Amino acid sequence: MAELQRIPSLQHKIHSMYRILVVLLIFGVVSSITGATAQDVFSPDQIPQDVRLGELRNLNGYFPMQVVERAEQWRERRDRIRRRILVSQGLWPMPTRSDLNAVVHGRVDRDGYVVDRVFFESVPGHFVTGSLYRPKHRNGPCPAILSPHGHWEQGRMYDAGEEEVAKQIESGAEAFAIGGRHPIQARAVQLARMGCIVFCYDMTGVADSVQIAHRPDRWRHLDRPDDWGFMSVQADLRLQNMMGLQTWNSIRCIDFLLSLDDVDPARIGVTGASGGGTQSMIVAAIDNRITAAMPCVMVSTAMQGGCTCENAPLLRIDQGNVDIAAAIAPRPLGLTAADDWTVELETKGYPQLRHLYQMLGATNSLSAVFYTQFKHNYNQVNRHAMYEFFNRHFDLGFEKIEECDYVPLTLEEATVWNKTYPRPSGDQIGEVHEVELLKLATQDSDRRLRTLDPGSDDFHQIIGAGWETILGRRLDEVGEVTFEVTAETKRSGVKVQAGKLTHSEQGEQIPLLQLRPQSESIEGVVVWVGNAGKADLFDSERLNPLLAEFLDRGNMVLSADLFGQGEFLKYGLSEHAQRMWYQPSDHETGWRRFSGYTYGYNHSLFAQRTHDLLSMIRYAQGIVPANKITLIGLGRTAGPLAMAAASQSGDVVLGKVTVDVEGFRFESIRSHDDPMFVPGAVKYLDIEGLRFDSQHGD
């Protein structure tokens, strides 16, 4: 009959008077034992009850909002959503804000409004471009609205054409030919006529943003250890991605608007559709200067956004677009749906948002329209809902709003580049510029993070919080684990109990061996991290001599096949590579091979194995006090994993942590599917960041 040992949930952080000791063994004290396979827990016809063996999550999955029941819970949840966004974008901490060096020129005069051409530097040498719409005859302060355009051809210069607009008018989606042909200009014009300043800015690689392509289709040759480009291993190890650049551009757009004398800083809005909807909800979530946001046809529990500018490693783990949109609460939020991936918003996502706003006492700050008879759009029907939204929340004072025809900007009037201000060329564009841009980002990040005092609060709040987000689970979040003994044998004279360690809440189950000492009383527990799993316990039938010493002193020894080790290899996993998910493509290169499509939705294998170690430590806590637990990891796999688990122990101070990483550094990784690849690891000081965070407070 199977023996079941149950460990109660951890209800609060456990404090200990003992200090953690992290010993870095520069010279290997014990060699890695990789002999015969240890006893299997699962029979050939059994499969571990582990959800991680299923298909990888991807952008086409189901992402219901995580609901909280109390306002104080929401504040903690909101802060974690924001931090995950910022970390994923490479913006934790924020980069140095350099001078914008903004140029405003080439005013175009229209009926009720004027349009200026604008460009400024979000990063030295990298330009944000766009059109600045201003109401005529108003001295301010005026509300200001960011208007990211989304994935329409040529962005803010989009022209749907005569044939398409005729269809739109016939369907009731548009009221006027001009507004229907130029819908992105139309919303800026109407808002300006209503008294708002509107900045319609270009996505990276669209319209006047000519320095870097919007989607890097040729990038493999820039995947190198030095002078790398976007989508490379080194870029992802530092969380340098196209989405992060675009998000930073949006933040600098707010900086630009607030530099204008006629802008009211208490009324800053953002609205866009499709990819512009993604930009809108992201910047609203992370920047409190946005006081109202209306992301359109993007907030959904279904497809999360398909472009590289909408995906980043770490972004949608434990959250989806509805959670991200919710992070603005209780500030005003408006939404639209269409006959696309948002078609079910009214019943999936919106009710949870409504519950949140009601709980926060801000019911009137949430609104949505569900015109799902129309395909993916920001048409006149939805634009009208947006005008009403900003009219209400920005106190514009209109009783009736009617969108009127206008004279659209020509391409010559819209472009910011001319003879006086020529478009970037030479080293300002292409791969040279891309490499230089990432060099600047690396230098800025290193300058700020590598000078932090390892014992300081800043180090813990930046480096520690970065690693906490990357790893995605702390010891005090592990909850209940159970161990079921399935077999009991003797090897090398040692009583060995084989069984299943299960974390039911997370749907995780790993095979574990429990070596019991000869004595009845257990003096301590050793959690042994194997480079190849529990097979490292024995060399043939001979027990590792170091562990034999621990057993002789009355310690129990625990070792397991962490996810992707040992017995897990029978179920289609590889010991040499992580599983990857990419956008379907006929080519083995190109933007669809972005690692963010995998690591934006799934924990890295390293993080998953860290979770397993935390479950083992949690189990050990039910046997002995934390100060009687010894964590040992020796080797290029086991050492970093032991450090990672120790770093996430929080206030639970283990008796001893012994580590030898054998010179391993994350920076040495050369492929995205390397079993030790961890997005962001190098940004947060590589192995040293884990070591120091493990010692924080010691």
Image (cartoon, rainbow, N blue to C red):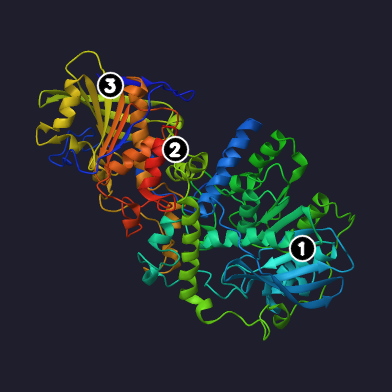
166 with respect to 392 (left or right): left
**Residue wearing tag 2:** 473
610 with respect to 429 (left or right): left
Provide the secondary structure element on which disc 2 rests. Answer: loop
Q: Which mark is on residue 260?
A: 1
Q: Is residue 683 above or below residue 52?
A: below
Of 684 and 586, nearer the camera is: 684
User: Tag 1: Cα neighbours inside 10 Å, few (<14), some, or many (≥20)?
Assistant: few
Which quarter of the figure has residue 402?
bottom right
| Residue 192 visible in the picture | yes
Residue at the (68%, 48%) spot, across then down: 288
Three-letter code for the amino acid on which mark 3 is drawn:
Gly
Residue 409 percent coordinates (x, y):
75, 78
Which quarter of the figure has residue 386?
bottom right
Provide the secondary structure element on which disc 1 rests. Answer: loop
User: Tag 3: Cα neighbours inside 10 Å, few (<14), some, or many (≥20)?
Assistant: many
Of 357 and 516, nearer the camera is: 516
Q: Earlier in the sequence, mark 1 or mark 3?
A: 1
Residue 657 percent coordinates (x, y):
31, 33
Residue 340 percent coordinates (x, y):
60, 58
**Residue wearing tag 3:** 524
Q: Nearer the viewer, mark 1 or mark 3?
A: 1
Q: CA distance from mark 1 to mark 3?
A: 65 Å
